Amino acid sequence: MEQTWRWYGPRDAVTLADARQAGATGIVTALHDIAPGEVWPVEAIEERKRIVEAAGLRWSVVESVNVSEEIKKRGKPWRSHIDNYIATLRNLAACGIHTVCYNFMPVLDWLRTDLEWELPDGSISMRFEADALAAFDLFLLKRPGAEADWSEQQQQGAHARFQQMTESERDQLARTVLAGLPGTTEVYSLDYVRAAIASYGEIGQDGLRANLGEFLRAVCPHAEEFGVRLCMHPDDPPRPLLGLPRIASTMEDLIFLIDQTPEQANGVTFCSGSLGARPDNDLPAIMQRVASRIRFVHLRSTKREASRDAFYEAAHLAGDVDIVTMMKILVREERRRAAIGEIAPIPFRSDHGNKILTDIGRPCVPGYPAVGRLRGLAELRGVLTAVEALT
């Protein structure tokens, strides 16, 4: 398996030198300055690739070529955005880059309610709490019809949570929830998010699934021709949010995804942290079911809080996720592929990481500190070494 590291480009405070010293050989990056729906020029791809290779590393995975909201909604320019997506895949393949992660989450790419949650050992984690999200939804966003999505008990918890918060804490919650796409510094406005959510009002889960199918049937034949492997990331967290539909949260969802097209280009990014935040997801069973279509792996662990509808990101070998069992499945799958002539290793990365030691006080993209991820990758490398020797 290939050990990779997410890097947000030249402005990332965590450098390529940090990634190399952490033991990664592959880099996961993207051209975050190019808006969804636009074509990635060959020249820009080659320049990013040159920077990565000059550091002694390889650009292994694109995360992400973002799918525009117009494609997700089948808005008026959706066809031209599809054509541009195909052109970007062609350009990436021409530059020797063949694994592309994407997601189909509407409006908000991922969501937490606290980016600086202090754990008992002093490390800093990210956390999701339903009461805090309900407080944001009901009393800050004031989304029309929000009351119907929260039970009476949840509304009471949200009200209590909101009353406990200072103005500064309310502002911080809003900024956290309204953060833009990963790799950007954009924070969406309340008005923008209200309007964006409303634009999905008539689509619903069935409509979003149908639009995903249209996207895959339009793109995957071309991806197959180019030798590109697309891999969709699960919802993060795997639950409906702010009235928006979610269609990549369960085994059923991933099977639906795979069933949309016959091409091997249609694959999965298996994220143990995203799927693991849902208590009814049996991660080893899901991984086993979709193993042949896994093209990229995010390994991390979450810890669900039994006393409330919440979870935080735990150390990689702690929490509720059985990393060892999943590593066994991945090693067996990689060996199966090798036996039939598929020699490319499965890329994985230590997804996210808690701030520890010198991470604390050092700027970084939320969830992507240097030392916390180094610890995670070292732990995963140890598990991988043991599993390969014993399996």
Image (spheres, rainbow, N blue to C red):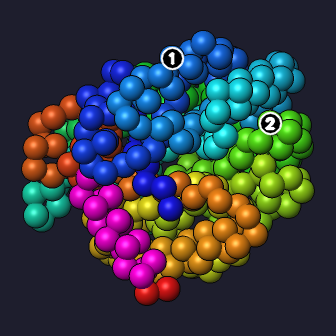
Residue 175 on image: x %, y % = 35, 31
Asked if residue 178 is positioned above or below residue 159 in the image, the reply reads above
Which element carries disc 1, helix, strand or loop? helix
| Residue type at tag 1 | Glu
Q: Main secondary structure of the magenta part?
A: helix
Q: Which picture quadrant has residue 82?
A: top right
Which residue position holds label 1?
A: 47
Residue drawn 66% across the image and 49% down it: 232
Q: Is residue 58 left or right of residue 77?
A: left
| Residue type at tag 2 | Phe
Residue drawn 58% across the image and 54% down it: 296
Q: Is residue 381 shown in magenta?
A: yes
Mark 2 crowd level (few <14, some 14–19, many ≥20, 10 Å Cα): some
Label 1 and label 2: CA atoms lie apart by 21 Å
Residue 71 on image: x %, y % = 77, 31
Q: Is residue 335 shown in magenta?
A: no
Which disc, if any, is residue 31? Answer: none
Of 144 and 258, which appears nearest the observer? 258
Q: Is residue 10 left or right of residue 41?
A: left
Of 352 and 154, which appears nearest the observer? 352
Residues in magenta, as a range: 373-389
Which residue position holds label 2?
A: 226
Q: Residue furthest bottom?
A: 390
Residue drawn 64% across the image and 33% down it: 96
Residue 29 on image: x %, y % = 48, 34
Q: Is residue 32 left or right of residue 362?
A: right
Is tag 1's residue or tag 2's residue first in the polypeptide sequence? 1
Asked if residue 203 is positioned above or below residue 317 in the image, the reply reads above
Residue 110 on image: x %, y % = 49, 44
Does the image show residue 246?
no
